[in-house]
């Protein structure tokens, strides 16, 4: 009999869960907020059935499942970052396998995570949670400039600001206070977090836990824009820099995951290597997005983390072993000036480059594009793979010199 797998609102990084479950001959049921979402997010025709619910509310999800013909099923998995907490709560209420609601809630709320890092002795950043500009000014004096101001429960670098003065703090706090909703109409909390600005290269640790044991781990090198924004420009997998500190970076990530009560499955943990050692930025209780998990890990190591996650949820145990020993990298495409997109030159050079894997241009001619302030400002991306990560990084740098984005 086919295993029944429920995936809650697959979108963005989580769409490959649907594909993987179908390829594993599972019966795939998706809980969605709208019946048009399979078309919207690109998995139409890959599922067996839909259940409609308010995916922002665990009670709505639970009621919708229990009132469907799928009262009995084998696994329930979150399909996007925003539903990790509500899905974990439903799983707990049904006594099903998964990480705890506490873990998912901490990962979704950066202030709760920081409190746990502090409590468990995980190296992190100085921080303060503020609700008003007065509290923000007082906190800035305690922590000291420069600072990072950001929402406690959003993603994709939305309204993440670099603050280096009282005037900038005033301006950005007014701006961030107007942010009331994020993706899928999830409410943005009225508490914001001020953090010490950590200086050093940034990494993400792709960590897969199997009953607290590290089943798979690797470090991704991240390149971002300079302050005041931190938009990710390129990922190189595995990292080519600070390899002598790789063990320390992984150890910090593992301790951070444990501090938040993560015991099983994929996590995507951001870490900076500072002059005082590694410091955790945040733990995400999900596979890495930005094509890290769906493309880079698969292209470099031949590992399908989505399939392995489903296997873990079904069997409560899993073995992960690379079938390749290569490297992969992704570069995101942006405009250097605001305006209407006319054309993008140089794409054929990418398609004919050695190791070419994928090229996607999301923006169409006539569409408004702008200099990046967050990940939504990307106009596309390309992926290459090969035997050596350093060579791939250098190749991306050269390819980007040949790409010209024309705007009116």
Image (cartoon, helix red, strand yellow):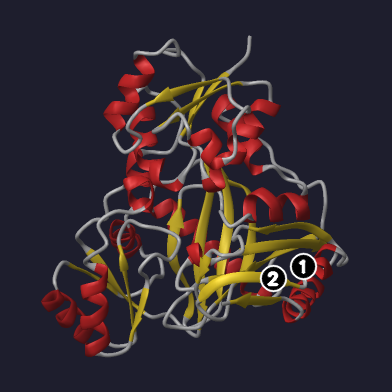
Q: Is residue 7 above or below residue 151?
A: above
Q: Depth check: 286 or 67 in front?
A: 67
Quarter of the figure with the C terminus: bottom right
**Residue 135 image label:** none
Residue 186 rendering spot, x and y as whole percentages:
31, 47
Q: Name the secondary structure under disc 2.
A: strand
CA–CA distance in space, label 1 to label 2: 7 Å
The furthest residue to the left: 134
The answer to whether any part of residue 351 appears in the image is yes
Residue 254 rendering spot, x and y as whole percentages:
51, 57
Q: Quadrant of residue 101?
A: top left
- The residue wearing badge 1 is 347
Residue 204 rendering spot, x and y as whole percentages:
56, 63
Judge the density around disc 2: few (<14), some (14-19), many (≥20) Cα neighbours within 10 Å. some
Q: Quadrant of residue 346?
A: bottom right
Quarter of the figure with the N terminus: top right
């Amino acid at each position: 009999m086919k295993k029944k797998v429920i995936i809650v609102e697959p979108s963005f990084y989580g769409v490959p869960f649907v594909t993987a479950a179908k390829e594993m001959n599972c019966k795939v049921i998706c809980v969605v907020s709208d019946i048009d979402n399979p078309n919207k997010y690109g998995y139409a025709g890959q599922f067996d059935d839909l259940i409609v619910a308010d995916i922002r509310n665990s009670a709505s999800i639970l009621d919708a499942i229990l009132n469907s013909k799928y009262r009995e099923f084998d696994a329930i998995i979150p399909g996007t970052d925003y539903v990790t907490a509500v899905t974990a709560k439903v799983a707990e209420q049904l006594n099903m396998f998964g990480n705890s609601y506490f873990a998912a809630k901490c990962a979704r709320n950066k202030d709760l995570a920081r409190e746990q890092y502090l409590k468990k002795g995980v190296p992190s950043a100085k921080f303060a949670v503020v609700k008003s500009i007065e509290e923000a000014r007082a906190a800035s004096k305690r922590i000291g400039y420069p600072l990072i101001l950001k929402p406690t429960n959003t993603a994709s670098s939305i309204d993440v600001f670099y603050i280096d003065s009282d005037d900038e703090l005033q301006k950005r706090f007014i701006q961030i206070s107007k942010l009331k909703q994020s993706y899928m109409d999830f409410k943005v909390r009225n508490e914001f977090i001020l953090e010490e600005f950590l200086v050093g290269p940034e990494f993400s640790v792709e960590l897969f836990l199997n009953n607290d044991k590290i089943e798979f781990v690797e470090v991704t090198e991240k390149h971002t824009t300079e302050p005041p924004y931190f938009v990710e420009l390129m990922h190189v997998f595995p990292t080519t820099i600070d390899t002598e500190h790789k063990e320390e970076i992984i150890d910090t990530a593992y301790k951070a995951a444990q501090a938040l009560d993560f015991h099983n499955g994929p996590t995507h943990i951001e870490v900076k290597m500072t002059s005082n050692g590694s410091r955790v930025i945040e733990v995400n209780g999900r596979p890495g997005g930005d094509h890290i998990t769906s493309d880079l890990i698969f292209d470099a190591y031949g590992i399908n983390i989505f399939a392995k996650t489903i296997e873990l949820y079904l069997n409560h145990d899993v073995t992960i072993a690379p079938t390749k020993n290569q490297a992969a990298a992704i570069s995101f495409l942006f405009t250097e000036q605001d305006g209407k997109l006319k054309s993008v030159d140089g794409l054929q050079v990418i398609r004919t480059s050695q190791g070419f894997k994928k090229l996607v241009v999301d923006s169409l001619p006539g569409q408004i594009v702008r200099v990046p302030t967050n990940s939504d400002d990307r106009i596309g991306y390309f992926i290459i793979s090969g035997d050596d990560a350093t060579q791939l990084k250098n190749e991306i740098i050269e390819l980007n010199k040949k790409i010209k984005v024309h705007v009116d």
